[in-house]
Amino acid sequence: MRQALQKLINFFTGGKIRSAAKEATAILEEAKAKEKETLLQAKEEAVKLRSEAEAEARQRRSELQRQERRLGQKEESLERKIELMERRDHALTSREKEIENTRSSIEELKRRELQQLELISGMSSAEAKEFLLNAVESEVHDDLARRMRQVEAQMREEAEQRVRRILAGAIQRCASDVASETTVTVVSLPNDEMKEQLIRREGRNIRALESATGVDLIVDDTPEAVSLSCFDPIRREIARIALEKLILDGRIHPGRIEEMVEKAKAEVDASIQAEGEQAAYKAGVTGLHPELVKVLGRLKYRFSYGQNVLTHSLEVSYLAAMLASEIGADVAVAKTAGLLHDIGKAVDHEVEGPHALIGADMAKRLGKSPEVAQAIAEHHGETDSMSLEGLIVSAADAISSSRPGARRESVEHYLKRVEALENIANSFTGVEKSFAIQAGREIRILVKPHEVDDLGALRLAHDIVKRIEETLEYPGQVKVTVIRETRAVDHAK
């Protein structure tokens, strides 16, 4: 049994060995075949790479040959250009020598001709030059003056047209009411019995009201009305409010009058603060010190030639902002300075000095920028310098105050100004007649044509303008027109 099992094992073992040997032989043959195939592929790849390398080398050799040919052509071209330049340089050198010789000959001829001219004229070259310069100067002087006058007229016309456009646009954009108030306020009464109640007690009520407010209470024959008279509008407003409260209350006696006056003062103070805040809001100016707002509100009760100063300040602020935006200036500075330019008028009875400088000092002290303070100080030309914003505020101030109906002047002052204008014009030599027109804003002067020529008329206009600026005070500007007229008259017989 054991031998049979051993034989069986040997049988199976021998079969596996033979099978393995066969498989090994097949693997070796397959490996040899793959090795031959790989070798063939490697040879083919090597041949291919060699062919590509040889083709690339041939291409590079041909490219190098082409570049060498181009370089050779460029070298030949440069050599030809260098040769051409050398020939031109040689020709120019020869030409320069010829020109120099010709110049020397011309200088010699000029020298000989100058000597001959000096012998003929009997003058040296310096004397002849001086003579010619004097002659040309005398001939050119009048032409130069006429040319200057034409240029000046043209520039003035162009400037006036531009200024008119800017000012007209600013004025058209600013629409405001004309305010004109007097120093008398009329208070209406419900009946004449109230007037009798005011007069009772031998006028003690009237005296108490006048003493408490500082105004004059005028009781006349006007039915159902009394008048309050005072130069200070704030006092007059306090008296008006107090009197209206007393009329509504019906109890009129000295103690009640003092109580109502105190209430009226509180109301007016609140109104002043509100007016200042409202003006700053309308003008679009923010960040004002409370004291500046209060002083600004007091301008509500100040008037200049009948024009309300607060309304005028708002107009100036609007106009200054518009003008600044048109010409590229600082709009914020111009607008703020325009609103505050007259705040000095609210305190000028307390502080000495011009209101422009007072206002500038107050604005600077209460936190406004130096530019704003400078523009306020400059708006009446009371400083040595003039900034662009100051000039804008000055122009806006003139526009607001000089437009028709804005201010009211006395007839006497108007007549004196017109007479002074004509007297100044008549004081100059050669003036025949002068006429002040347009409410003293223009003066036309007729000159004697045989005494004043065209250039003299131009100088005369400048001299009269200078004299007016030095001696007269006037709102806005005065236009001076000098007219020179020549008439030729004959009679046919």
Image (cartoon, rainbow, N blue to C red):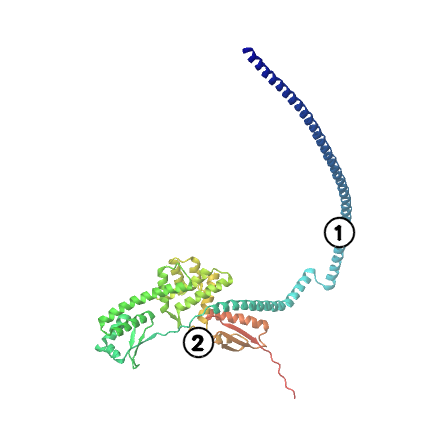
Q: Is residue 305 left or right of residue 228?
A: right
How many callouts does the rendering have?
2
Residue farthest toward the left in the current orientation of the protein: 201
Q: What crowding class fits label 2: few (fewer than 14 Cα within 10 Å), some (14-19), or many (20 or more)?
A: some
Q: Residue furthest front?
A: 1
The amino acid sitting under disc 1 is: Glu
Question: Between disc 1 and disc 2, whose residue precedes?
Answer: 1
Quarter holding residue 318: bottom left
Q: Is residue 52 visible?
A: yes
Q: Mark 1 or 2, which is nearer the eye?
A: 2
Secondary structure under the numbered disc 1 in the rendered image: helix
Residue 52, image x, y percentages: 72, 33
Mark 1 near mark 2, Cβ–Cβ under 8 Å?
A: no
Q: Nearer the viewer, residue 196 or 11?
A: 11
Q: Secondary structure at mark 2?
A: helix
- Residue 350 shows in the view: no
Quarter of the image containing the N terminus?
top right
In the foreground, 37 or 213:
37
The C terminus, quarter of image: bottom right
Above or below — where is 34 with respect to 416? above
Rendered image: mark on residue 100: 1
Between residue 413 and residue 219, name the one nearer to us: 219
Q: Using the image, determine if residue 3 lies above or below residue 365.
A: above
Left or right placement of residue 328 versus residue 106 in this view: left
Residue at the image position 75 percent from the left and 51 percent from the top: 100
Q: Residues within 10 Å of mark 1 (few under 14, many from 20)?
A: few
> Measured from the top left, where is residue 369 in percent x and y?
42, 57
Using residue 139 as the reference point, say whether residue 89 is left or right of it: right
Give me the C-alpha separation between circle 1 and circle 2. Answer: 80 Å
Q: Amino acid at mark 2?
A: Tyr
Per the rendering, the mark at residue 414 is 2
Image quarter for residue 345? bottom left
